């Protein structure tokens, strides 16, 4: 079967602390999303999601994009970029207008979204997203499209994603310095949700945990929208550093050791299995030195599980703070590069006391096997988000003052009520 004609092309860059990855995806005439090319390289100039060296970050971004362009056999001029740091915060705004029992028209929906736009209060922070999650008719939730229905009052729940302005502007500048236009900055948990979660999981209640190199984002989905978000300044690179420190080896050796022999689950043979701590090509010295460069695998597993215990403890606290408790909505999905560690799902399931699965990108034509892992879920989600082109209320309709009354943000009460309903 030949390649269908591509009607539109989307470029995405996920700027992480461990690696920077790029993807070029096309929307075919049949509506299928096809990966045209992807590439990645080690990150530079990024620390816990923040740009710390503009020149180094720009070089790494340009290099990753050029690798994706080479694989795709095509170039791109604009991209959607993922943001995992920058003090991300998620809020839910509830807004209502009077309808008076008549049939809802398109103008009423636009009127409502304009009212919602004017009620956003970012408090000096940058608004990354302001999207209608679902509508309400006389307080009844779960209405996807209210047009043509009757109601006394029409409402909408708006998901607002905020970030610190300066770090986001640094990310944008690093991309622009690589001679690329920025279509939009997308919060990594939003992109990961597009890639890893089904509509049913987003509706019933799911905790999506993205374990990055230096930041772990814990996001809570319910009622079809992201209700809460908490960033933990701890990631898979911290496990690597602990391995390097424990065994007196360099970071690249520790990373390789973690990937090849590391595990989050102990086995009965770990104490008998000896593993080398020197990487291939390293000078092991004399025979005595070579003997001391081997350790029982159990020691490596012990270091890994000790660090994971710290992380899952923080994740558990974050979930409790966001109201993720009770018998409903107990699913946990792990994604991000840290979710590729052997046995991490079993460890998290035991530590959190909830069903845990690994979230990977959906099966897309053209997606290389190497990029079909959890570490590239956010990257694929960026392209899927771009193709979906969700409505942002900041770009809806003419700017005019609404003449009917509407509720304020009600942020805390709305989040607490939603958490109570779903958890």
Image (cartoon, grey):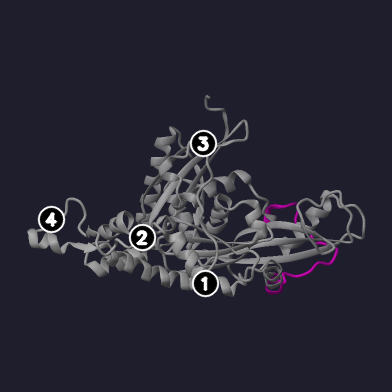
Instruction: Name the foreground residue: 327 vs 164.
Output: 327
Residue 211, above or below 72? below
> What segment is highlighted magenta in the picture?
394-414
Q: Residues within 10 Å of mark 2 (few under 14, many from 20)?
A: many
Q: Residues within 10 Å of mark 3 (few under 14, many from 20)?
A: few
Residues under labels 3 and 1: Cα distance?
36 Å
Q: Kindly identify the residue that appears in the image at 71 percent across and 74 percent down.
A: 413
Instruction: Identify residue for label 4.
Output: 283
Element type at mark 2:
loop
- Chief SS of the magenta region: loop
Residue 261 in picture, x, y percent from top left: 30, 57
Front position in the image: 60 or 388: 388
Residue 412 within the segment the image draws in magenta: yes
Residue 365 has which mark? 3
Q: Earlier in the sequence, mark 3 or mark 1?
A: 1
Q: Which residue is located at x 78 percent, y 69 percent?
A: 407
Q: Calculate the distance from the C-alpha at mark 1 to the C-alpha at mark 2.
A: 21 Å
Query: Which of label 3 and label 2 is nearer to you?
Result: 2
């Amino acid at each position: 079967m030949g390649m269908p004609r591509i009607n539109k092309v989307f470029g995405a860059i996920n700027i992480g602390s461990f690696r920077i990855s790029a993807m070029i995806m096309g929307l075919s005439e049949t509506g299928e999303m096809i990966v045209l090319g992807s590439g990645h390289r080690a990150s530079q100039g990024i620390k816990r999601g923040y740009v710390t060296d503009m020149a180094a970050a720009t070089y790494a971004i340009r290099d990753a994009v050029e690798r994706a362009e080479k694989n795709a056999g095509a170039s791109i001029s604009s991209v959607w970029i993922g943001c995992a740091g920058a003090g991300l915060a998620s809020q839910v705004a509830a807004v209502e207008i009077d309808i008076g029992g008549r049939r809802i028209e398109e103008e009423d929906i636009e009127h409502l979204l304009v009212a919602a736009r004017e009620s956003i209060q970012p408090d000096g922070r940058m608004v990354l997203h302001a999207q209608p999650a679902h509508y309400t008719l006389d307080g009844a939730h779960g209405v996807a499209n209210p047009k043509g229905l009757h109601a006394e009052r029409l409402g909408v729940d708006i998901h607002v994603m905020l970030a610190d302005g300066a770090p986001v502007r640094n990310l944008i500048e690093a991309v622009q310095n690589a001679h690329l236009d920025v279509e939009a900055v997308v919060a990594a948990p939003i992109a990961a949700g597009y890639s890893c979660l089904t509509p049913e999981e987003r509706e019933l209640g799911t905790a999506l945990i993205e374990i990055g190199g230096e930041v772990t984002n814990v996001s809570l989905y319910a009622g079809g929208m992201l209700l809460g978000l908490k960033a933990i300044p701890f990631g898979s690179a911290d496990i690597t550093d602990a391995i390097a420190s424990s065994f007196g080896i360099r970071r690249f050796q520790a990373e390789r050791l973690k990937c090849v022999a590391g595990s989050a689950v102990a086995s009965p043979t770990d104490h008998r299995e000896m593993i080398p701590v020197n990487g291939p090509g390293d000078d092991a010295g004399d025979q005595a030195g070579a003997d001391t460069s081997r350790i029982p695998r159990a020691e490596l597993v012990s270091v890994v599980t000790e660090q994971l215990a710290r992380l899952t403890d923080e994740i558990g606290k974050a979930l409790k703070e966001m109201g993720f408790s009770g018998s409903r909505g107990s699913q946990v999905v792990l994604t991000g590069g840290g979710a590729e560690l052997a046995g991490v799902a079993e460890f998290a399931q035991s530590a959190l006391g909830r069903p845990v699965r690994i979230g990977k990108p959906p099966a897309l034509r053209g997606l290389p096997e190497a990029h079909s892992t959890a570490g590239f879920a956010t990257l694929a989600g960026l392209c899927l988000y771009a193709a979906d082109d969700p409505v942002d209320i900041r770009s809806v309709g003419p700017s005019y003052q609404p003449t009917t009354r509407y509720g304020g943000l009600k942020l805390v009460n709305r989040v607490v009520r939603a958490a109570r309903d779903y958890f």
